[in-house]
Image (cartoon, rainbow, N blue to C red):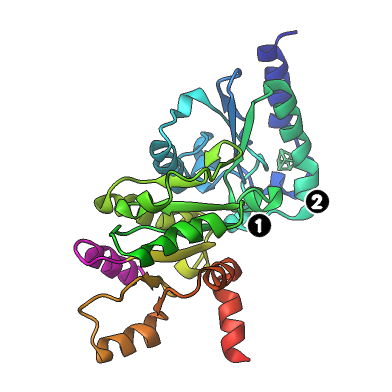
Amino acid sequence: MGTIDLIQNLNDEIKKCKKCRLTMTRTNVLCGEGDLCAELMLIAQAPGEQEDKEDKMFIGPSGEVLDELLKIICIDRKENYMTNLIKCMLPKNRKPKSDEVASCSQYLDREIDLIHPGMLAPLGYYAAVKSGAIKRFVVMAGCDGRQKARSYYTEVAENLPKDTVILTAGCAKYRYNKLALGDIGGIPRVLDAGQCNDSYSLAVIALKLKEVFGLEDINDLPISYDIAWYEQKAVAVLLALLYLGVKGIRLGPTLPAFISPTVLKVLVEKFDIKPIGEVKADVVAMMTGRQQAHKKKVV
Ligand code: SF4
């Protein structure tokens, strides 16, 4: 039997599956789809509400996130095989329970055996965390300049753990995009959206991820912001981030010229804006995320 028939048999089995409680809340069971000879297999967490209703993979907000990410790394959807860790919708986008993962992940294992891709890319929060592939994103966008102090961004890129991905836009990337930072399951560790104006793509990704994960606060995403400042359009980017409610942004190597003591007081109190500091300490602080920072403050 060839791969087409074996996948068809597996999908027939998945469509009839009633192994866990998600049978009660699903409309459809979503099987994998795409190129059976794909080098890259994209693995999302579970179908969303719209996907469940329409019986189609990666549509709605999660599909828009995927399209933005694939556009950045110049990959065509049709060249990949796309599937879910959990084949039935999770009510209210909740995280999968361990028994649901145990029941359903055997289907994923069989898909991987049959397709035999060269690379696996876990996309969903749970899939990524479960696999341990990506722990955190660091937005290191903004401007480049000649000052020696800007080598901070090169050193941060060198010191970030290998399970982090840098999201960038603008010329700040020239400080680190020639470094051999490698990839995570085929995803480059520097994802470059383009120029300053393309920061829009990064904001769209953050907003869609917030929607997909069902988060109330954009600051609960595993994203840190370490922005290289040089005025110009960076002002618009910073204001856009503040408008979205992003807190804890690091700015450097100088603070914006428009920041008077009064404005600085408001930005610190309301948005927890801070200047860049010592490389290793900043990397540790960014990796601990917002919750750790809050704990420290309470103590
Ligand atoms: S989530 Fe997986 S194990 Fe549970 S019913 Fe659906 S296909 Fe079966």
Q: Please name the predominant secondary structure of the magenta segment in the image.
A: helix
Residue type, label 1: Lys
Residue in view at x 63 percent, y 49 percent: 128
Name the residue carrying label 1: 95
Magenta stretch bounds: 229-244
Name the residue carrying label 2: 99
In depth, the one of 77 and 171 nearer the eye is 171
Residue in view at x 63 percent, y 91 percent: 299
Q: Is mark 2 within 8 Å of ligand 1?
A: no
Image position, residue 297 (x, y; %): 56, 88
Residue in view at x 28 percent, y 60 percent: 146
Label 1: few (<14), some or many (≥20) within 10 Å? few
Residue type, label 2: Asp
107 inside magenta stretch: no
Residue 288 vertical position relative to residue 99 in the rendered view, above or below: below
Within the image, what quadrant is residue 52 found in? top right
Image position, residue 110 (x, y; %): 76, 28
Residue 130 vertical position relative to residue 77 in the rendered view, above or below: below
Residue 256 - label = none
